[in-house]
Image (spheres, grey):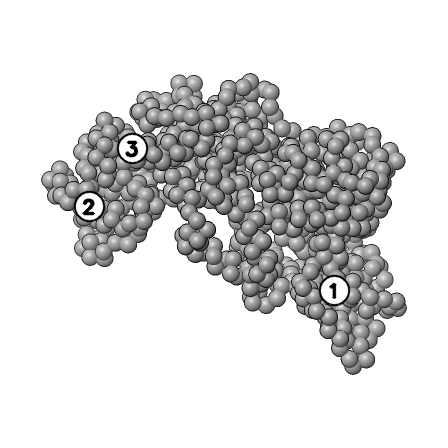
Amino acid sequence: MQAILENLRSGEITTCEVPAPELRPGGILVRTAFSAISAGTERAHREQAEKSLIGKAMARPDLVRQVIDYAKKQGIRSAYERVQTRLNTFSPLGYSCAGTVLAVGDGASEFQPGDHVACAGGGYANHCEINFVPRNLAVRVPEQVSLESACLTTIGAIAMQGLRQSGATFGETVAVIGAGLVGVLTIQLAKAAGCRVIAIDLDSGRVQRSLSMGADLGLCNASNHIPEAVSEYTQYGADVAIITAATPSNEPIEMAAKILRDRGRIVIVGDVGLGVSRNNVYSKELSIVLSRSYGPGRYDPLYEEEGVDYPVGYVRWTEKRNMEAFVALLASGALNVAPLIQCRYSVQEGNRAYAELKSSGAYTVLIEYPSTSFATTVSTASFSPVAKKVAPKETINIGCIGAGSFAQNVIFPAVRGAMGAVLRSVATGSGVATETALRAFGFAKAQTPSDLIQDPENDAVFVLSRHDSHARYVVGALSHHKPVFVEKPLAILDEELEEIRCAAEASREQGCAPFVMVGFNRRFAPLTRELCSFFHGRKEPMMVHVRVNAGFLPLNHWTQKKQEGGRVLGELCHFIDWARFVVGAPIQIVNAKALPDVSRYNRDNVTVTLSFEDGSLANLIYVANGDKTVPKEYMEVFCQGRVARLNDFRSLELSHEGKTRTIKSSFEKGHQREIELTLAAMRQGTECPIPFEEVMEVSRATLAVVASIESGEPVNLEKQKEALQQRCSARQS
């Protein structure tokens, strides 16, 4: 499919051919007919993107501080590489479009293939030929509304939310400061609500056009007589001022304060300066309210991404219900957006479309997409098993699913630098992120995840996507007898782990040993190897203590989401594996507790006790309530008169017979060695660097931590394994 992408370093806009997105639960695939470029939001974004690196830094001091903090923790070189990777990213543009439903995921049954829909949201309603859109960011469009008009629905919802925030009622006077696209839509909505409307803008041409769009009075604020003109027109001053202008200046809000009546209301929709003279506001006891985008639900991942609606009795107008109301007004004829649609460009002309918006002063520019039968393009994640044995190779072609920051900063460079490995193919859930990987890392082609796994030219699969997708991609790779490397966790549900075990057994039955490597890198760190050598030949059980000062993550962070498994499955698994490797014996019992505060922490203040087959014990403390100045990872091991202390993988202290030896390291956590060993084993057709049963054991132990926290009881891994197999067998029968 074709997509309009922006290079974050140069600001250049390019139309690229990228794979279509996958259909996921809770949303729909939409073939776009039209998408709208917003003259306000997107033009402001483009001005930012076109600045030099110094200009970007000056405009975003908050991001500069983040880089400085990261450099203090991880080093200047690591921070530099991270910034360079980010700057080399190609990002999708757009947030308002309309089209036809191609396919419907589980949990989005209110839609059907063939429905016309209007879609919203940056990262979803992109300037792309096909988009995946969560259910709460899409609304059906009736037959009498053209998709051309419906593609302005998101922008209309922004205007509608601003008017709702004002509390304007029938007969009141509303002053709209800024007669651009959102401003003119606000004018029409206010008129439909029975208000008198005053349009104010610097551009006299737009003031005149706003009169034809329904404004009762138009004023050009190049004049110094606006307060007098408003006072003469209203007798008291305006009841409400809605600021839809976009400027860093404080002038719009100062203007609003001057033209309002006593106890009037100011609503800020546009990105304007918020400084206002206290006397102007205090003397009239004015109210100032900000309007946040499309309405309640905006920026709430539970609402937007997981489809959790707000009860209508408590939140009447969510962002989706605002979109539905806007579409209904289009259908009734109360709104007329046809005069606002002045320019159209094909998706191949994305760069020209943005240039037109910048030079012409148009309200909006529409991107038009080719009309193709909606039944022809649906990406699926089903995998048909094939019989294939892995033979040794001098060079191995790698297909990578996922191209996020970890993949770009750690995995891709490591694979590219390894002997005998070729980055051949890349796939992502959205499709658009593949362009960055193609250009920055030299992948030969971009594919959908299902095509990548089934492509016979891809010898091995690296799964680097979000956690909820790991298991199904691993099963797909195993069904094609391809070795697979998957970033932790291997699975986020017991049932998924059982599916992987069954796929591995099926592979064995066909004569191919399953190769499943999980990214448990810390066991491959140089200091871990030194520590294990220090205890080599021990004849007593070990006492292991691991403290992880993981740091606070808000509940809306993607790793905290229920469908992603949370931080226990996503990160604590590293330290279960590290303890398993150091002890060198199977885990038998898992006992875990978590602090009860779930309003701020998502059960990510956890203590875990692991009991091993040889009598060893490991105590793991994982906390989110610590201080970030304290190093993240600290391990202690006690055994047979010896003590080892590993400090954040920077130094290792080995104490024995009253003497302590210290070994320094350059903060190497084992990623490079992990990838080298994995690729060598894949290439040679030998056993995985971590045995399959050990990978499964650590994964079961990690899932057992969650189960133990929930039940308050310890979990026996062997009994857990047997119970799961019986449960799955009963369900299949």
Q: Residue at x 59, y 59 (%)?
A: 77
Quadrant containing the C terminus in the rendered view: top right
Residue neighbourhood size for the residue with mark 2, other residues' Cα within 10 Å, grouped as few (<14), some (14–19), many (≥20)? many
* Amino acid, disc 2: Leu
Q: Residue at x 82, y 75 (%)?
A: 641
Q: Name above or below for residue 387 compared with residue 404.
A: above
Q: In the structure shown, which secondary structural element does the residue marked by tag 3 occupy?
A: helix
For the residues marked 1 and 2, what is the alpha-carbon distance in whole angstroms?
Answer: 69 Å
Question: Mark 3 or 1, which is nearer the eye?
Answer: 1
Q: Nearer the viewer, residue 399 or 191?
A: 399
Q: Nearer the viewer, residue 308 or 305?
A: 305
Which residue is denoted by mark 3 in the rendering? 184
For the residues marked 3 and 1, what is the alpha-carbon distance in whole angstroms?
Answer: 64 Å
Q: Are circles 3 and 1 on residues that touch, CB within 8 Å?
A: no
Which residue is denoted by mark 1 in the rendering? 527
Quadrant containing the N terminus in the rendered view: top right
Picture coordinates of residue 395, whole percent (x, y)? 78, 40
Asked which quadrant contains residue 141, the reply is: top left
Which residue is denoted by mark 2 in the rendering? 260
Q: Is tag 2's residue or tag 3's residue first in the polypeptide sequence?
A: 3
Question: Mark 1 or 2, which is nearer the eye?
Answer: 1
Question: Mark 2 or 3, which is nearer the eye?
Answer: 3
